[in-house]
């Protein structure tokens, strides 16, 4: 069977399964609408460490170990880890995964990294290169603000278009047997640049890439919105959501009935003061682990298009006046 | 056929071929011992741009386009790009690959990224997910010094253990037919930390990971040094080379007859004032493109173990007192 679909997609011959998922989050996420669903809510934003970066690494370590335990496996049975984060040179991942002594593929797709990890992980399992792989992504409000914005002590005001970086790590073990959800296909994203330069409106930066990947998924699999129970983007927030829906309407597809965004699910924007919504690699990762997989397992949804979205910038590129391109990587999740 | 070998390796059933390679470098690399072998030597360190980062992106774009042209393909025929660099949030890659409009997997393995890209690229082609993929990695002396060290204008003195970041990008098209070199197997590296904290002695930070990956390759494929014409690490430099050879001797393997290091091949340390040697993602990438592939194609070597090596640090982790772990990803290259 030729598994290549259209221009950017693969339909797996032996769809890998998500056999376990672990979600570790911070206090604010624990207070949000999905709070009761996370595996671990840590009230200490430092996770017992002395820096934001070490806190994020510890969060990765906890999530990875928990995912392996929930899969009823030993660490040595995991053949590869696919993981990434938002920090320069992926230090949350390097120091988070060090102790587990697994072969590691470090990934960077900004906040789309969870999608990238699931894609490469499922390609690996489907091809028979591994019985089990670990796919993971994290972000931390403190380390991200320090990396990209101003010191928290400044208490800078944020425009309403800004999003709130999720403190969270989602880790997933993929394998051939077990679990209630399979990854039946993937659509890998291109870098899409509409020239938006506002780093405090990341939804607008990423929406075009989400639209491109979703459109391409429809083309490659000969599907439309009605073929999915839900189409769930990563962290577009309320402004990005509007743009996405409008862009796809222009292409002849109305996804307003199916669409939601992890950034809108994870916080209650009104009471939690998160403005446009949640963001960060961890946003889609923990929403997948805590909410999306559950809805699929319980049979409330049968097929979901999961589309983590990333804004490709650094403070250097931003300060040098470059635009902020986006990328979005989709995975088709189906109830078994 | 079960393609899994031992703990960390794959032996490919349909070994992907490197059907073209392109190497684009700066002036200093052009003046080195391999200078006459590079495809393009740009005398302008800015590559016609107004920042080091844009220069590196332009270098990626030039190398990618040249590799595709040398493979006698059109850009649309490349199904995926696997690429990375050293800059925070991979901006050299994001802005370098934007124009080509390919599905992109952004990778970060520090200076081992060329190995990581070849591994994921060859896994993808071997599994039948793509006819052609592009694998690429770059570094730039100016952007790396700005990212990791001091402003060049300070003219800081460097210790003799320091290496010199290569300005260069290597790009490779993998496919099923053509070319003179196949990737017969891979050994994916673990994160190895001996607790070294000296960021001006990266060879010492990375040597343990190179030793670990090479040792694991010997175990997984039931081979020894004598089974390779050359064992070529990425950028250990002269100090790292010594440590690597000693570590493997302790394990019962003497690779001193087979070993060389791209960082030692690319510059003439005595006349070019590069101290311990060359480094950066581009170091192993352009040495592969200009030198290693040629030696294999000409039949001077039949089987090479190519082992790009990476030091996992950021200025943040370093300044917070963390150690500098290493990672090394190996590819077995064979003459067809």
Image (spheres, coloured by chain):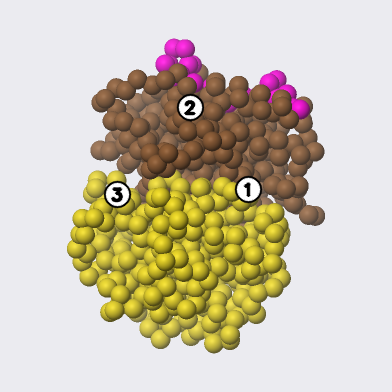
Chain colours: A yellow, B brown
Q: Mark 3 — residue?
A: A315
Mark 2 burial class by Cα count in 10 Å: few <14, some 14-19, many 20+: many
Quadrant containing the C terminus of chain B in the rendered view: top right
Give how far across and how far down residue B299 sits, in percent.
69, 27
Q: Earlier in the sequence, mark 1 or mark 3?
A: 1
Residue at x 49%, y 55% (from the top left corner): A58
Residue A144 is left or right of residue A153, and the answer is right
Q: Which mark is residue A201?
A: none
Residue at x 66%, y 28% (from the top left corner): B247
For mark 1, give the secondary structure. Answer: loop
Q: Nearer the viewer, mark 1 or mark 3?
A: 1
Which portion, as a residue range, is magenta? Answer: B252-276
Residue at x 54%, y 60% (from the top left corner): A62
Mark 1 burial class by Cα count in 10 Å: few <14, some 14-19, many 20+: some
For mark 2, give the secondary structure. Answer: loop
Residue at x 48%, y 33% (from the top left corner): B197
The alpha-carbon separation of the residues under discs 1 and 3 comes to: 32 Å
Question: Magenta segment: does it hold B270?
Answer: yes
Picture quadrant of residue A324: bottom left
The alpha-carbon separation of the residues under discs 2 and 1 comes to: 23 Å
Give how far across and how far down residue A294 sits, in percent.
55, 79
For mark 3, give the secondary structure. Answer: helix
Mark 3 burial class by Cα count in 10 Å: few <14, some 14-19, many 20+: some
The alpha-carbon separation of the residues under discs 3 and 2 comes to: 27 Å
Picture quadrant of residue B221: top right
Give how far across and how far down residue A209 sits, in percent.
38, 65
Of residues A155 and B169, the one nearer the viewer is: A155
Q: Chain of mark 3?
A: A
Q: Chain of mark 1?
A: A
Q: Mark 2 — residue?
A: B201
Q: Mark 1 — residue?
A: A101
Q: Chain of mark 2?
A: B
């Amino acid at each position: 069977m030729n598994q290549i679909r259209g221009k950017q997609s693969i339909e797996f011959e032996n769809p890998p399964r998500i056999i376990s998922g672990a979600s570790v989050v911070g206090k604010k996420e624990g207070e949000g609408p999905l709070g009761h669903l996370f595996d671990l809510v840590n009230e200490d934003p430092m996770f017992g460490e002395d820096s934001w970066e070490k806190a994020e690494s510890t969060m990765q370590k906890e999530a990875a170990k928990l995912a392996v335990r929930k899969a009823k496996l030993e660490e040595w049975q995991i053949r590869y880890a696919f993981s990434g984060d938002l920090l320069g040179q992926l230090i949350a991942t390097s120091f988070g995964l060090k102790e587990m002594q697994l072969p590691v593929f470090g990934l960077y797709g900004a906040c789309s990294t969870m999608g990238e990890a699931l894609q490469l992980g499922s390609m690996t399992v489907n091809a028979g290169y591994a019985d089990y792989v670990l796919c993971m992504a994290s972000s931390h409000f403190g380390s991200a603000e320090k990396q990209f914005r101003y010191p928290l002590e400044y208490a800078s005001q944020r425009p309403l278009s800004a999003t709130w970086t999720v403190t969270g790590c989602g880790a997933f073990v993929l394998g051939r047997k077990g679990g209630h959800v399979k990854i039946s296909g993937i659509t890998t994203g291109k870098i899409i640049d509409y020239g938006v330069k506002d780093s405090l409106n990341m939804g607008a930066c990423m929406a075009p890439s989400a639209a491109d990947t979703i459109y391409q998924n429809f083309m490659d699999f000969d599907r439309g919105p009605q073929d999915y129970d839900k189409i769930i983007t990563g962290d577009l927030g309320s402004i990005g959501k509007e743009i996405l829906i409008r862009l796809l309407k222009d292409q002849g597809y109305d996804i307003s009935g199916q669409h939601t965004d992890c950034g809108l699910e994870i916080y209650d924007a009104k009471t939690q003061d998160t403005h446009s919504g949640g963001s960060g690699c961890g946003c889609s990762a923990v929403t997948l682990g805590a909410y999306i997989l559950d809805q699929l397992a319980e049979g409330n949804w049968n097929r979901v298009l999961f589309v983590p979205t990333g804004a490709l910038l650094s403070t250097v590129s931003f300060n040098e006046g470059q635009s902020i391109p986006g990328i979005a990587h989709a995975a088709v999740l189906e109830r078994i």
